Amino acid sequence: MKEAIRENILRLGADICGFAGIERFAQAPKGFHPLDIFPGCQSVIAFGLALPKGIYMAESRLVYSYYNSFVCAQVDRLAYQTASLVENTYQGTGVPLPSDGPYDDWDEEKMEGHGMLSMKHAAYLSGIGTFGKSTLLLNKDFGNRLVVGCVLTDLPIESDPMAADICPDGCDVCIKSCPVGAISNVGVEQKPCRINCYHKNKRGFDTVDCTRCRTACPLRFGLWHTPVER
């Protein structure tokens, strides 16, 4: 069943898929645990779609913003299809979760928010990748380009092996590249990052004005790709 589900998710368009049993979420914060969302959850199915490498090299601030949002919608569509697959083919229950918004949790002063479930942590616990110092998810094949979605299910599915850490211990490129000093060895301060990154142009369209932690990372395209100089 597990490999058949994975094969179907990849066929539907995902670039990668992983599985995590509910026991792996023991350290999830209260209110953001899979069981807080779906009390019958036994497993989490996580998957990712990779942004095209060209988005990282385009100079226009609109290109990344638009297609990152576009891929989030594709991930949500895939989550819906996966939940339907779980229910129609395997007689389980599937709860698709939004890959980005909407979510309720928000600290206005700190400009910090938490989704219903951390997609990055779901991907990490499913063996898809590990974290860089920027807290971005790193995958050996897709670098930091994955947009992650997941489905909660009551089907008992064996966890995949955890991924090996690929962020070099001595690398601090993302820390040095952040123009507002939001990244440190202990994580990311969201407020200066958000203020620096997210704006609107004169026409009212959303823009992402800074992606330096993504584009400067030597592993942005994965282990097997030669970095493109910026």
Image: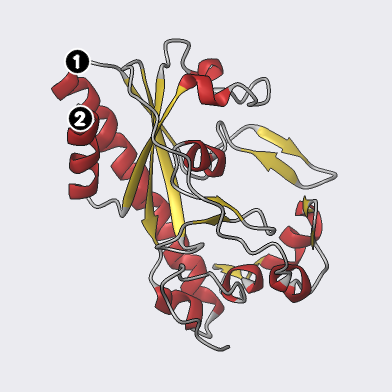
Residue at coordinates 69% horizontally, 41% vertically from top-left?
113
- Residue drawn 42% across the image and 63% down it: 142
Q: CA distance from mark 2 to mark 1?
A: 9 Å
**Image position of 79 with respect to 130: above or below:** above
Q: Is residue 162 left or right of residue 206?
A: left
Location of mark 2 (residue): 85
Q: Which badge, 2 or 1, is on the more N-terminal residue?
A: 2
Percent across and percent down for residue 34 are 51, 22
Left or right of 20, for residue 101 = right
Q: Amino acid at mark 2?
A: Leu
In this view, the residue farthest toward the top is 40
Which element type, helix, strand or loop, lies under badge 2?
A: helix
From what the image shows, is residue 87 above or below residue 46?
above
Task: Determine which quarter of the picture holds residue 79.
Answer: top left
Looking at the image, which is closer to me, 165 or 229? 165
> As displayed, is residue 96 above or below residue 166?
above
Which residue lies at the image location 47% right of the left edge and 20% below the top edge? Answer: 22
